[in-house]
Image (cartoon, rainbow, N blue to C red):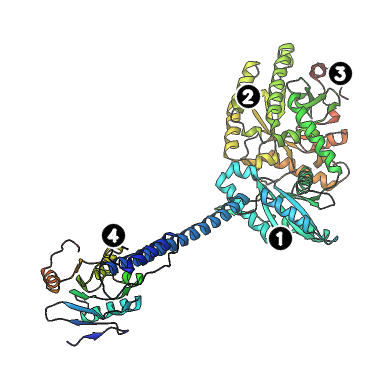
């Protein structure tokens, strides 16, 4: 399927043939609460409210507001979430999300796409990054 | 500058600056990360996020403190309100009333419209509580509150002072308006109150005191209270306005009350006896014991002055006990001294309060036996109104007294309810017809017919009749002709002491 642009234009969502839903944030975006809400709505739509593992590309995102982070503690169609980043900054951002809010499903941070996909497909919960 | 001479990353210096600013309390301070995305940028990002968290937690805390303070303030207001209102009725309590009176006095500017205080005391509340129980009593108080609220204006305050006493602050009104409100309050309480399946009547005695210069809230309440007592003593269910003369009556009452307490113990009480004679033969069938108070300073005080006070203060129980004991003891002495004259009975008046004594029957039985007097020689006189309003407790006691063999007499007949059917249902042997019924017996033929009918009624109920207040031969002969068996009154002798009774019985002294 073609990627669906999230309202606000800061990211896109598509259902990958690998059986997971893929949320891609653009680099250097500041994710506010409306963006997070829009992304969640789009994910739920794309999944047709069926639970799917979710891969989130968040490398080089400039910032995620506190309110935006809170949105992601609301249960959605993601059955497990792999946060994919590259830099130490990405790791710090991802862990602020994991540490401050309780995710509704197993969530981990990865710097390797292969590892992320492997975990998403394995259905195992592992130690957080 | 780092130790080996290389230029340190300028971001490190910025980090130090940033942390210093944050430490100083500037939680809005933020650092800017570079494009590198390296570890130092990660630290910068982390510190920004931590600062944001701190700021957020701070703000949340302040919000919670503000909310908590507001809640505490609300609770305080509520507590203050509770401390100022009566829990049962929701009316103001004495404290709040005084406050409002104070405000009203201070605000009064117009000489024609001044504050006034009403004090209301329910007239038969104790009886309601005793016969129907406290929850019924509470329901009555709530209904009374509702009625009082409905007759006052919005600016007035209705308060409950406690027990069955209420007060009203009339914020500012002319004398006419104030008295009108007092009258409305009285009228509102004329209608019966329905409690479940029972219907009760509770009127109030109402005292009014209108503000005058120099009066404090306590003075207003006190004088309205005095006026209320005046209303009560004048027969209840009335409105009376305070007048300085009333103060004298109050002082008199409290003096009498305190002295009455020690009168029995101090030997100041004495019994006189008035004969009850058989009209046909002139034979003395009995004597009625009448109490006198020989006050060391004021001389002989008649019962109509102190019996009322005794009943209101509960002293009547002690008084009654003394009269019973002394009367029966005297009967024992007469019996011992002149056994051949032992045929007559002793009539003793019993009050409403005494009928509620649960040791009354035992006391009577014991005292009779102690002095060797047969129960049938004692006749207890109870007024018509007390008997009519008797409850289950009193009913029991009356039956136990009958079972003991003591005689019961309905007193003051013709002054109360006069519901005909009760005559047959009351556990009595004799009926004493009140003197007011024979006042115009000789001059008014209708009165003559009326008394004849009353006596027939009593006879039909198979009771004996005694008519009191007989002062003339004319009255006596008419009554005798009507079939009345017994009489009492000055014609047959005034109340005399025990020794004179015996002389009289022996025929040594002629009546009058």
Callout 3: helix, strand or loop?
A: loop
Mark 2 vs 4: CB contact within 8 A:
no
Viewer-closest of A88 and B420: A88
Earlier residue among tags 3 and 4: 4
Earlier residue among tags 3 and 2: 2
Viewer-closest of B190 and A128: A128
> Pointer 2: residues within 10 angstroms few (<14), some, or many (20+)?
many
- Check disc 4 and report the residue beneath it: B3
Residue mark closest to the camera, 3 vs 2: 2
Residue B502: x %, y % from top left:
79, 17
The answer for how far apart the CA atoms under marks 2 and 4 are is 116 Å
Extreme-bottom residue of the structure: A2
Residue B509, which numbered label? 3
Callout 4: helix, strand or loop?
A: loop
Residue B441: x %, y % from top left:
85, 42
Residue mark closest to the camera, 3 vs 4: 4
Residue B311: x %, y % from top left:
71, 35
Q: Residue at x 62, y 24 (%)?
A: B363
Residue mark closest to the camera, 1 vs 3: 1
Q: Identify the subunit bearing mark 4.
A: B
Is any part of residue B451 visible from this angle?
yes
The quadrant of the rendering that contains the C terminus of chain B is top right
Callout 2: helix, strand or loop?
A: helix
Residue mark closest to the camera, 2 vs 4: 4
Residue B152, which numbered label? 1
Q: Identify the subunit bearing mark 1.
A: B
- Location of residue B361 by image quarter: top right
- Check disc 2 and report the residue beneath it: B364
Viewer-closest of B493 and B120: B120
């Amino acid at each position: 399927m073609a990627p669906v642009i999230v309202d606000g234009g800061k990211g896109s969502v598509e259902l990958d043939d690998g059986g997971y839903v893929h949320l891609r944030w653009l680099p250097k975006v500041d994710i506010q609460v409306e963006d997070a809400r829009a992304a969640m709505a789009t994910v739920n739509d794309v999944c047709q409210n069926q639970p799917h593992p979710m891969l989130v590309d968040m490398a080089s995102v400039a910032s995620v507001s506190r309110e935006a982070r809170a949105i992601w503690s609301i249960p959605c169609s993601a059955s497990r979430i792999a946060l994919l980043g590259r830099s130490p900054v990405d790791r710090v951002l991802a862990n602020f999300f994991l540490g401050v809010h309780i995710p509704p499903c197993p969530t981990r941070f990865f710097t390797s796409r292969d590892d992320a996909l492997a975990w998403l497909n394995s259905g195992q919960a592992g130690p957080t990054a | 500058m780092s130790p080996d001479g290389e230029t340190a990353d300028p971001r490190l210096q910025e980090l130090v600056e940033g942390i210093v600013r944050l430490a100083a309390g500037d939680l809005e301070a933020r650092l800017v990360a570079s494009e590198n995305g390296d570890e130092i940028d990660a630290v910068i990002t982390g510190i920004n996020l931590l600062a944001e968290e701190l700021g957020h937690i701070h703000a949340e805390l302040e919000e919670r403190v503000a909310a908590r303070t507001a809640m505490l303030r609300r609770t305080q207001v509520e507590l203050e309100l509770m401390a100022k209102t009566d829990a049962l009725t929701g009316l103001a309590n004495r404290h709040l009333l005084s406050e409002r009176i104070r405000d009203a006095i201070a605000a009064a500017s117009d000489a024609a419209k001044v504050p006034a205080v009403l004090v209301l005391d329910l007239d038969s509340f104790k009886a309601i509580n005793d016969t129907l129980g406290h929850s019924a009593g509470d329901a009555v108080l709530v209904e009374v509150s509702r009625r009082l609220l409905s007759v006052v204006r919005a600016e007035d305050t209705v308060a409950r002072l406690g027990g069955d006493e209420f007060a009203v602050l009339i914020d500012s009104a002319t004398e006419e308006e104030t008295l009108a409100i007092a009258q409305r309050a009285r009228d509102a309480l004329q209608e019966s109150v329905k409690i479940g399946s029972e219907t009760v009547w509770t009127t109030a005695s109402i005292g009014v005191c209108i503000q005058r210069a120099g009066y404090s809230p306590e003075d207003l309440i006190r004088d309205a209270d005095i006026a209320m007592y005046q209303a009560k003593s004048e027969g209840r269910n009335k409105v009376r306005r305070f007048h300085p003369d009333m103060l004298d009556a109050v002082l008199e009452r409290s003096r009498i009350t305190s002295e009455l307490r020690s009168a029995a113990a101090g030997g100041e009480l004495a019994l006189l006896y008035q004969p009850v004679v058989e009209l046909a033969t002139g034979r003395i069938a009995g004597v009625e014991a009448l109490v006198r108070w020989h006050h060391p300073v004021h001389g002989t005080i008649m019962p109509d002055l102190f019996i009322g006070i005794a009943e209101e203060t509960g002293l009547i129980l002690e008084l009654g006990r003394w009269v019973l004991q002394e009367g029966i003891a005297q009967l024992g002495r007469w019996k011992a001294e002149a056994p051949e004259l032992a045929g007559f009975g002793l009539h003793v008046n019993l009050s409403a309060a005494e009928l509620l004594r649960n040791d009354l029957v035992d006391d009577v039985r014991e005292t009779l036996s102690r002095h060797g007097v047969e129960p049938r020689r004692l006749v207890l006189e109870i007024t018509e109104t007390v008997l009519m309003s008797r409850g289950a407790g009193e009913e029991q006691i009356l039956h136990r007294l009958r079972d003991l063999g003591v005689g019961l007499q309905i007193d003051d007949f013709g002054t109360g309810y006069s519901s005909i059917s009760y005559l047959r249902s009351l556990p009595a042997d004799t009926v004493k017809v009140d003197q007011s019924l024979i006042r115009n017996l000789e001059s008014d033929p209708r009165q003559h017919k009326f008394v004849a009918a009353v006596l027939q009624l009593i006879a039909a109920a198979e009771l004996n009749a005694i008519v009191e207040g007989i002062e003339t031969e004319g009255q006596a002969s008419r009554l005798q002709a009507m079939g009345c068996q017994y009489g009492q009154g000055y014609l047959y002798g005034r109340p005399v002491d025990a020794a004179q009774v015996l002389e009289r019985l022996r025929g040594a002294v002629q009546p009058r």
